Image: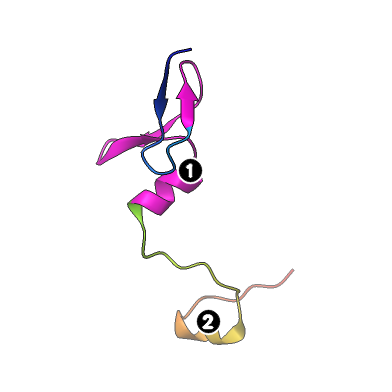
Amino acid sequence: MKYIECDNCGSKIPLGEKIVSHRMFCGVYCSDKCFLIAAAPDRQVSTLTIDFIEKFNAKVQED
């Protein structure tokens, strides 16, 4: 089997499998998650709260 390794996690990506890449970044990744980890290491994942909405001046909508 011919393969390359994901530039983030090192998992095997066999020939013919889906890859993620970007013309402005070097590397080939096995998933969007691995790409985001490599491309934006300082990103934050958090819970949406009223304080967060007020801090970032987001528009609250309701159904």
Residue 45, position as x, y percentages in the image: 52, 67
Q: How many marks?
A: 2
Q: Is residue 25 above or below residue 62?
A: above
Q: Secondary structure at mark 1?
A: helix
Residue shown at the point (41%, 35%) measured from the top left: 6
The local crowd at label 1, few if under 14, some if 14 to 19, many if 20 or more residues have their Cα within 10 Å, is few
- Which of label 1 and label 2 is nearer to you? 1
Relative depth, front residue between 4 and 56: 4
Q: Residue at x 54, y 75 (%)?
A: 59
Disc 2: CA contacts within 10 A as few (<14), some (14-19) or many (>=20): few
Please indicate whether residue 45 sits to the left or right of residue 20 in the image.
right
Can residue 22 be seen here? no
- Magenta part of the chain: 12-38
Residue type at numbered disc 2: Phe
Q: Which residue is mark 1?
A: 32
Q: What residue does disc 2 label?
A: 52
The location of residue 21, given as percent across then percent down, is 36, 35
* 7 in the magenta segment: no
Q: Considering the numbered disc 2 on the image, is that residue within a helix, a strand or a loop?
A: helix
- Name the quadrant of the C terminus: bottom right
Residue closer to the observer: 6 or 51: 6
Residue 54 seen by the camera: yes
Q: Give the distance between the C-alpha atoms of the residues marked 1 and 2, in whole angstroms.
A: 25 Å
Q: Earlier in the sequence, mark 1 or mark 2?
A: 1
Asked if the residues shown at circle 1 and circle 2 are in contact, with their CB atoms under 8 angstroms apart, the answer is no
Question: At x 41% / y 64%, what residue is drawn?
Answer: 43
